[in-house]
C-alpha cells in the first residue's frame, strides 16, 4: 500500500508546525514580558504617587499648623520660657496633663470632666494675643530689619509640632507620664492577700 502523503510534504508540514509552535511560545513569552512591564510600571507609578501625596500632605499639615500657631500666637520659645520660670504654671499644666492621661485610661465620668475643665480654666497659658502676652513677647524680641525673628521661629516650631498630630503627642505624653511614674508601686491583689495572711 502506497503512502497517501509523500515524505517531503510530511517534513515540510512538520517544519511549519515547529515554526508555528516556536512563534506561539515567543508570543506568549512576549505577552508575559509585556504584562510584567505593565505591572512594574504601575507599581512604580503608585509608589511615586504615594510619595508625592505624603509630601504634599506633610506640607499642607505644616501650613495649617503654622496658621493655627499664628492665630493663637503660640510662640514655642515664649511658652518654654514661661514654663521654665513659672513654677505654679508648670505644676498646673502637669496636673492637667495627668488628669487627661487618666481620663483616657479610665472612664470619662462627669466628675472627672468637671475637674479637668476646672484645671484647664485655671491655666493661664502663655498663648494668645492678649495685651500682657504681647508686652512680654516684645520685651524679648530679636529684631532684624524690623522683624521679630524669635517670634516667627517660635510660630514655625509650634506649626511643626501641631502638624505632627494629636496621636503623636498623646503617645509621647503617655510615655513621659509612664517614665515619671516608674518609681511608684501600685498595690495589687497579691500584695493585699499576703498582708492579710501575715496578720
Image (tube, rainbow, N blue to C red):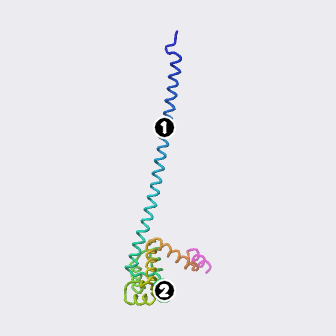
Question: Measured from the top left, where is residue 177 in percent x and y?
Answer: 52, 77
Q: Using the image, determine if residue 61 lies above or below residue 142.
A: above
Instruction: Look at mark 1 in the image and give the residue it sits on.
Output: 28
How many numbered discs sit on the rendered protein?
Answer: 2
Quarter of the C terminus within the rendering:
bottom right
Question: For mark 2, does the 10 Å Cα neighbourhood hold few (<14), some (14 to 19), or many (20 or more) residues?
Answer: few
Outermost residue on the front side: it is 145
Q: Main secondary structure of the magenta part?
A: helix
**What residue appears at the point 40 percent right and 90 percent down from the top-left corner?**
135
Q: Which residues are magenta?
A: 189-199
Q: In this rendered view, identify the residue nearer to me: 180 or 155.
A: 155
Q: Using the image, determine if residue 190 lies above or below residue 15.
A: below
Q: In this rendered view, identify the residue nearer to me: 67 or 199.
A: 67
Provide the secondary structure element on which disc 2 rests: helix
Q: In this rendered view, identify the residue nearer to me: 29 or 195.
A: 29
How far apart, in angstroms, are the residues tagged by discs 1 and 2? 71 Å
Is 22 on the left-hand or right-hand side of 53? right
Q: Name the mark nearer the viewer: 1 or 2.
A: 1
Provide the secondary structure element on which disc 1 rests: helix
As drawn, the label of residue 81 is: 2
Q: Earlier in the sequence, mark 1 or mark 2?
A: 1
As drawn, the label of residue 97 is: none
Outermost residue on the top side: it is 1
Residue 154 lies in quadrant = bottom left
Question: Measured from the top left, where is residue 176 in percent x and y?
Answer: 53, 77
Q: Are marks 1 and 2 in contact (CB under 8 Å)?
A: no
Q: Using the image, determine if residue 9 lies above or below residue 88.
A: above
Is 188 covered by the magenta stretch? no
Is 123 on the left-hand or right-hand side of 198? left
Question: Measured from the top left, where is residue 58 in percent x and y?
Answer: 44, 67
Question: Measured from the top left, where is residue 170 in percent x and y?
Answer: 47, 74
Amino acid at each position: 500500500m502506497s503512502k497517501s502523503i509523500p515524505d517531503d510534504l510530511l517534513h515540510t508540514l512538520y517544519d511549519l508546525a515547529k515554526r508555528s509552535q516556536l512563534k506561539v511560545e515567543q508570543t506568549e513569552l512576549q505577552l508575559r514580558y509585556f504584562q510584567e512591564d505593565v505591572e512594574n510600571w504601575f507599581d512604580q507609578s503608585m509608589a511615586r504617587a504615594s510619595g508625592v501625596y505624603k509630601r504634599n500632605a506633610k506640607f499642607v499639615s505644616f501650613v495649617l499648623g503654622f496658621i493655627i500657631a499664628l492665630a493663637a500666637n503660640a510662640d514655642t520659645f515664649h511658652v518654654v520660657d514661661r514654663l521654665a520660670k513659672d513654677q505654679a504654671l508648670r505644676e498646673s499644666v502637669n496636673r492637667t496633663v495627668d488628669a487627661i492621661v487618666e481620663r483616657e485610661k479610665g472612664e470619662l465620668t462627669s466628675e472627672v470632666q468637671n475637674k479637668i475643665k476646672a484645671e484647664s480654666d485655671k491655666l493661664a497659658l502663655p498663648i494668645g494675643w492678649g495685651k500682657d502676652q504681647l508686652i512680654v513677647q516684645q520685651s524679648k524680641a530679636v529684631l532684624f530689619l524690623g522683624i521679630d525673628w524669635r517670634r516667627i521661629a517660635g510660630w514655625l516650631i509650634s506649626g511643626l509640632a501641631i502638624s505632627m498630630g494629636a496621636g503623636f503627642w498623646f503617645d509621647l505624653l503617655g510615655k513621659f507620664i509612664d517614665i515619671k511614674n516608674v518609681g511608684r508601686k501600685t498595690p495589687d491583689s497579691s500584695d493585699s492577700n499576703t498582708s492579710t495572711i501575715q496578720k
